[in-house]
Image: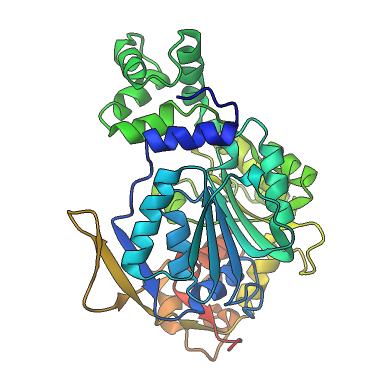
């Protein structure tokens, strides 16, 4: 590691030494360029699909090897800018973009603190980045300034309840004078002889590739958050938490459910009466290490769109006329040589069985969700309705698209 004192440059050097995540094995692009802008709008409660323009300007700061390219393929009518401090990561991304023809993507070697964007972007995607800076509030302020007034920020930061053992191990390495030393970290991991959650987690990870182990256990700087501390950081930057972001990663880990984890009618009514942020805080407090990933959409305080609560979004879903998504996607697979090759045919977009097959099959583009579910023995409400909406109408679960917009 160099003696550079710029935190973003130190992180860039770390990811040049341990590039992670690696190239995606599979890249996809929908044959409908308006699909993902519409699905993103739906996740925020806009079933008219006006919230995110198809020709949006999009910024992906801290884009790494994959993220800006994935966004550019999903939003082919948008102009996407990817920024990163790792020149090696950017070159890998640039090569892959050429192979799949993503000519709407521009890549820049820069850190977030280097930029001075003002009111420039409709959509900013920054996941797993600002928590690697000693002053995450500084970076969040830059992201806030870059948003257009009606813009959307997608942000992921570390959940403090998920990082307890990792933070402790990093502190131990610093005390031993071994910070950033992969060989020493693995030696220490193998030498621990007292059973604990830390020992179990380290032993599980010792067999992982070096880049993955380093990303988890050796990162030179990280800050961890709760819903409460993230909300306060956002407020200081002139932002507000708008909605949790549903992601395949969170679903795959089983860390995606923001509904309070108890089955008691009286308590459930108390929880439902809380404002959204306090309800999310309650869920995190009661699920601790199994609490959801802190992956949220944020908005500027002066955003002209109404700030909807989760109950508002649920009601708008019920009153929307919906139809099944019929889009297909082009697919590129990564070959043994490292390059991407296209499949000779398009494939259905749908990622698997729908969350509620009977609603998906009944959707006809003429009736609202309320009408489609009126005859069910128990029409969905509360948490069940929320899970249904998030399991069918968002980018992570692209089954239903509102037919009330063109």
The x and y percentages for residue 156 are 56, 47
Closer to the camera in the image, 219 or 406:
219
- At horizontal 44% and vertical 32% (from top left) the residue drawn is 14
Colouring chosen for the image of the structure? rainbow
The x and y percentages for residue 190 are 29, 15
Residue 142: in sight, yes or no?
yes
* Quadrant of res 206: top left
The x and y percentages for residue 42 are 59, 71
**Quadrant (top left, top right, bottom left, bottom right) of the C terminus:** bottom right
The x and y percentages for residue 339 are 25, 58
- At horizontal 51% and vertical 89% (from top left) the residue drawn is 365
- At horizontal 37% and vertical 40% (from top left) the residue drawn is 19
Closer to the camera in the image, 65 or 167:
65
Q: Determine whether 174 is above or below 201 in the image.
A: above
- What residue occupies the far left of the structure in this picture? 336
Q: Determine whether 366 is above or below 294 in the image.
A: below
Residue 352: in sight, yes or no?
no
């Amino acid at each position: 590691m160099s003696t550079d004192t710029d935190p973003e440059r130190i992180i860039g050097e770390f990811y040049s030494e341990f590039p992670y995540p690696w190239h995606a094995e599979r890249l996809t692009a929908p044959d409908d360029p308006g699909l993902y802008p519409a699905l993103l709008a739906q996740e925020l409660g806009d079933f008219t699909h006006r919230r995110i323009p198809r020709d949006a300007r999009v910024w992906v700061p801290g884009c790494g090897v994959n993220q800006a390219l994935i966004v550019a393929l999903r939003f082919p009518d948008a102009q996407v800018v990817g920024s990163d401090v790792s020149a090696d990561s950017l070159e890998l991304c640039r090569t892959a973009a050429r192979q799949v023809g993503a000519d709407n993507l521009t890549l820049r070697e820069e850190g977030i603190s280097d930029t001075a964007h003002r009111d420039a972007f409709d959509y900013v995607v920054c996941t797993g980045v600002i928590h690697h800076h000693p002053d995450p509030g500084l970076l969040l302020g830059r992201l806030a300034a870059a948003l257009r007034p009606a813009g959307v920020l997608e942000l992921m930061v570390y959940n403090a309840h998920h990082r307890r053992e990792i933070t402790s191990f990093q502190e131990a390495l610093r005390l031993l004078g071994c910070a950033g030393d992969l060989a020493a970290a693995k030696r220490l991991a193998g030498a621990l002889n007292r059973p604990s959650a830390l020992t179990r987690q380290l032993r599980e990870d010792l067999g992982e590739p070096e880049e993955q182990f380093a990303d988890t256990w050796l990162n030179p700087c990280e800050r961890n958050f709760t819903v409460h501390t993230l909300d306060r950081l956002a407020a200081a930057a002139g932002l507000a938490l708008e909605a949790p972001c549903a992601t395949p990663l969170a679903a795959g880990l089983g860390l995606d459910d923001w509904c309070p984890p108890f089955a008691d009618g009286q308590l459930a009514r108390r929880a439902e009466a809380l404002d959204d942020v306090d309800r999310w805080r309650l869920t995190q407090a009661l699920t601790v290490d199994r609490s959801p990933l802190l992956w949220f959409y944020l908005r500027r305080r002066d955003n002209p769109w109404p700030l909807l609560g989760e109950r508002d979004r649920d009601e708008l879903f019920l009153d929307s006329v919906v139809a099944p998504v019929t889009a297909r996607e082009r697919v590129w697979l990564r070959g043994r040589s490292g390059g991407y090759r296209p499949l000779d045919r398009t494939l259905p977009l749908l990622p698997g069985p729908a969350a509620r097959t009977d609603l998906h099959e009944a959707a006809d583009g003429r009736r609202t969700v309320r009408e489609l579910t009126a005859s069910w023995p128990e029409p969905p409400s509360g948490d069940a309705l929320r899970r249904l909406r998030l399991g069918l109408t968002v980018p992570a679960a692209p089954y239903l698209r509102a037919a009330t917009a063109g």
